[in-house]
Amino acid sequence: MMEVLYSSRRWPRPARTAQGLPVLTVWGRTDEGRPLVVMLRQVPAPATRWEILMAVPMGPHQLTEYNAWEANQ
């Protein structure tokens, strides 16, 4: 998961949870090439920071979309 977050080929994408809360998803690959989506939320002040909520393997549709993005980088 951390490999995806620190990768130079990560794809940050804003999203919303099923409850409508704003989150950031970061799409990328581990060093071994495993495609993952990492979901984060911004923790409010006083110190603005990000909290990792979850990481999941990309689904088929996500992987197709990511491969297309990756090919254009």
Image (cartoon, rainbow, N blue to C red):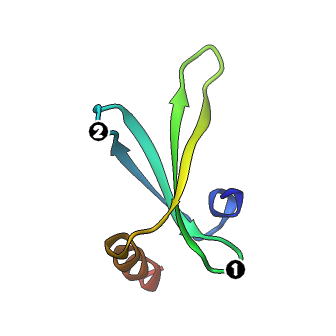
> What amino acid type should be assigned to the residue bearing mark 1?
Glu
Query: Would residue 69 appear left or right of 55 to someone viewing this image?
Result: left
> In the figure, 3 relative to 53: above or below?
below
> Could you tell me which residue is drawn at 42 percent across and 39 percent down?
23
Could you tell me residue 28's position as x and y percent? 55, 68
Count how many numbered circles sit on residues in the image.
2
Label 1 or label 2, whichever comes before in sequence order = 2
Assign a secondary structure to mark 2: loop
Name the quadrant containing residue 2: bottom right
- Tag 1, which secondary structure? loop
Residue 31 coordinates in the image, percent (x, y): 71, 75
How far across and how far down the image is residue 38, in percent? 54, 54
Which residue appears at 48% of the width and 79% of the height? 73
- Kindly check if marks 1 and 2 are in contact, taking CB atoms under 8 A apart as contact: no
**Which of these two is toward me, 45 or 31?**
31
Q: Residue at x 37, y 81 (%)?
A: 68
Question: Is 45 rendered above or below residue 34?
Answer: above
Residue extending furthest toward the top: 46
In the image, residue 73 above or below residue 50? below
Q: Give the residue number, with chain letter if any, for mark 1.
A: 32
Residue 50, quarter of the rendered image:
top right
Residue 20, given in percent of the width and then of the height, sits at 28, 33
Q: Which numbered circle lies on residue 18? A: 2
Q: Residues within 10 Å of mark 2 (few under 14, many from 20)?
A: few
Packing grade of label 1 (10 A; few <14, some 14-19, many >=20) is few
| Quarter placement of the N terminus | bottom right
Amino acid beneath label 2: Ala
